[in-house]
Amino acid sequence: MFEWTDPKAVKTYTQYYLYLLFAYNGRIGRSDFARGLFFGYFCIIIINVILVFVSFEILFLADLGFLWFLGLLLPIFCLYIFPLVFLTQKRLRDMGFTSDARAVIIVGALFGTILWLLGPIILVSACLFAPGENFINSYGKPCTLHGDLKRRRETLINAAESCLGRNDFKRAILNYSELGDNRLVKKAKKAHISHNYDLLHSQVVRMNDKGVLCEDLVNTTNNLSSLVNSYLGIKPQESPSTLSKLDDSLSFSESESGKEELKVE
């Protein structure tokens, strides 16, 4: 559940941002600090502001005491402080500061808040612009998590697309699942269903053309067409030109029974 606390175990972008904001181990570079600050920490600030207003509403509407209010405010305060401390700790490690030096810097920055927030501003600016050590130090090698995740994503997507081109849907779904992208997994599953239905429909039409008595099978296939189209989100009255806009990988052909069938190009 908390495997993302180890940078070596980070596999998805969600785990990447959890690691930046809530993990203590390792070191991060300037770009990682910037992503954690602007895309992660600022979102936490917005959530905290909302939680503060909700806490005030609960306090006054429920007529709770001051201790209850402190109990509600404490988690919000921790959510505000700890992610910034964890981000800064990992960045200062990348710059080569020892544990004692990091403690002095962070405490000094906290006390510097009384001077028009100069302490945090100077510390964040240093973390954003000061270069790190481009070699392995006592806290590990330079952080390459974001680049590694980007290359891993590209590799898995290319592998999945290659599998789709061979109609190897199961392996494509496995690649998308390993990637952790539920949208692509669902898209591949829909393409798999569409492909299997198209094969079934082709066989039924071929049997019907050869004079094989398969009226029940034809009726079942036609009923299945409605279920497939419903699952894929396709309305029967939609035209092929409209349907093709839903997914570039899908197209439609008109069967002899007048029903629209889904095909994978």
Image: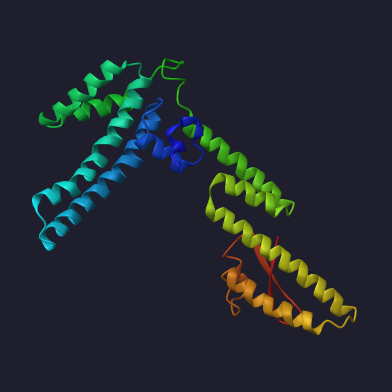
Q: Which residue is nearer to you in this view: 130 or 188?
A: 188
Residue at the spot x=45%, y=20% of the render? 140
Residue at the spot x=59%, y=76% of the render? 238
**Is residue 180 shown to the viewer in this render?**
yes
Residue at the spot x=63%, y=59% of the render? 189
Q: Quadrant of the N terminus?
A: top left
Q: Quadrant of residue 199?
A: bottom right
Q: Quadrant of residue 216?
A: bottom right
Measuring from the top left, give residue 135's x and y in whole percent.
46, 15
**Is residue 131 shown to the viewer in this render?**
no
Q: On screen, 82 above or below 174? A: above
Colour mode?
A: rainbow
Residue 202 vs residue 82: left or right? right
Measuring from the top left, give residue 177's x and y in whole percent.
58, 49
Residue at the spot x=15%, y=32% of the render? 117
Measuring from the top left, give residue 172's x and y in whole percent.
66, 50
Measuring from the top left, give residue 205's x and y in whole percent.
81, 76
* Number of marks in picture: 0
Q: On screen, 127 above or below 193? A: above
Q: Quadrant of the C terminus?
A: bottom right
Q: On screen, 242 above or below 110? A: below
